[in-house]
Image: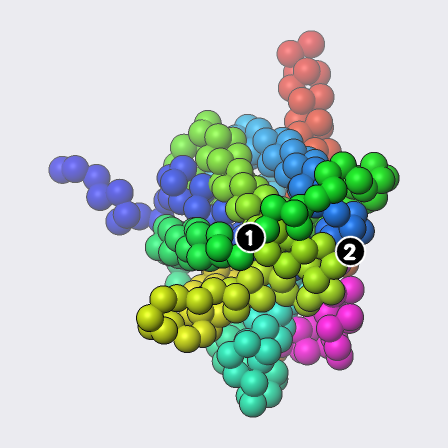
Amino acid sequence: MKHFEYGDREVGTLEVFASVANMVIGFGVLMLPRSIVEITKSVDGWISIVIGGACALTFTWILSKLISRFPKQNVYSIAAVLLGRPAAVFVTLLFALYMLLFTGYETRGVATISRIYLFDRTPIEVISLVFLLVLVYGVAGPSAALLRLNLIFLPIVVLLLTALILMNIGFFEFRNLKPFFAADWRDVLYASKESVFSFMGFDILLFYNAFINRPLKIAKAASLGLLLPFFLYLLVFVFTIGVFGVDVTGSVLYPTAELAKEVQVPGGFFERFESIFFSVWVMTLFSTAAMAFDVSLLALESVFKKANRFTLILWLTPVIYLAGMQPQNLLEIRIFGEWISYAGIGFGMVVPTLLLLLSLLRRRKKSA
């Protein structure tokens, strides 16, 4: 009897590719042009994106090599072998907390953007609650189903961004990109930190490794999944400056959203393209937040073996909602996201690197 590929709870390299890409693509596309231009004051920010992307790609490869050495195991099992059980529990609980806060940030971000561009009369608290309830529905099922959902969402989002760029070609002015190589190299390096923040999210593989059926091909799939948002970020950044110029891009809250407002479809078939843009973009934000919520559940389930998944969801949902409602204004939301990004660097870059080094040292001792 032929095996039914989607009849089990395992995923392949295609799901890994789509999941990494969807996890990385999120608020970064909406906010990255402004964040970089605020520092570089020129189109030279594309160099910062290249530096940040190269850094993220390097650590994605390191993380992939780590989990490929421990097939079907999550970070709790790996850390228990290399560091001992108490340290593994500590690291896993911190990872769960980080992902919960990340989910709260995504929920608040969706509510804020939806309030600005879609539901201007609906309170942010109500939008956050409705979005969070949809997340609860999404994470109540198996993790593999959530990963396969990215195969549906990712092509739609890529087509939407492609359409957004093509429809703005008529507004693109090459002179807005000049002068080239005018930014100070220190500003370019400092701005690369913002691009690194936008590339975070590949650390979900530390727990989804348990569902991957081709561990030796994880590195290639994860790297390709990161390269897709890398090229999208470059295109969106250049087109945003080409349409608005450096000064306007640095002063607009969400430059990519404003780019969607510039679209004019012949015949007036779509009078507000930005509404369509955000309606579709919410799918990506849902996928990102749902995977973060799911990973936090997987982390807690790996520590508390007898815990019921739905019970954990009921306890954690109010925590996520309260965490997302803590920032009182846009500045506090930005600071909240920055601290979460720093935590992402720790769990997505530092921890996998240390664990891989320990794994190599342990193997060398055994061979000696």
- Looking at the image, is 91 positioned above or below residue 98? above
Q: Alpha carbon of mark 1 to alpha carbon of mark 2: how far?
A: 21 Å
Locate residue 354, reporting x and y percent: 73, 33
Q: Neighbour class for label 2 at 10 Å: few (<14), some, many (≥20)?
A: some
Q: Which residue is under mark 1?
A: 172
Residue at the image position 48 percent from the left and 30 percent from the top: 220
- Looking at the image, is 169 positioned above or below residue 366? below
- Looking at the image, is 105 positioned above or below residue 10? below
Left or right of 200, for residue 288 = left
- Looking at the image, is 357 positioned above or below residue 276? above
Q: Can residue 193 be seen by looking at this rendering?
A: no
Magenta span main SS: helix
Q: Quadrant of the N terminus?
A: top left
**What amino acid is found at the position of numbered circle 2 in the picture?**
Glu
Q: Secondary structure at mark 1?
A: loop
Depth order, front residue of 28/108:
28
Locate residue 38, reporting x and y percent: 78, 55
Q: Which residue is under mark 2?
A: 38
Picture quadrant of residue 322: bottom right
Residue at the image position 58 percent from the left and 66 percent from the top: 258
Is residue 327 one of those drawn in magenta? yes
Left or right of 299, for residue 342 = right
Q: Neighbour class for label 1 at 10 Å: few (<14), some, many (≥20)?
A: some
Q: Which region is colored magenta?
A: 321-338
Residue at the image position 48 percent from the left and 55 percent from the top: 170
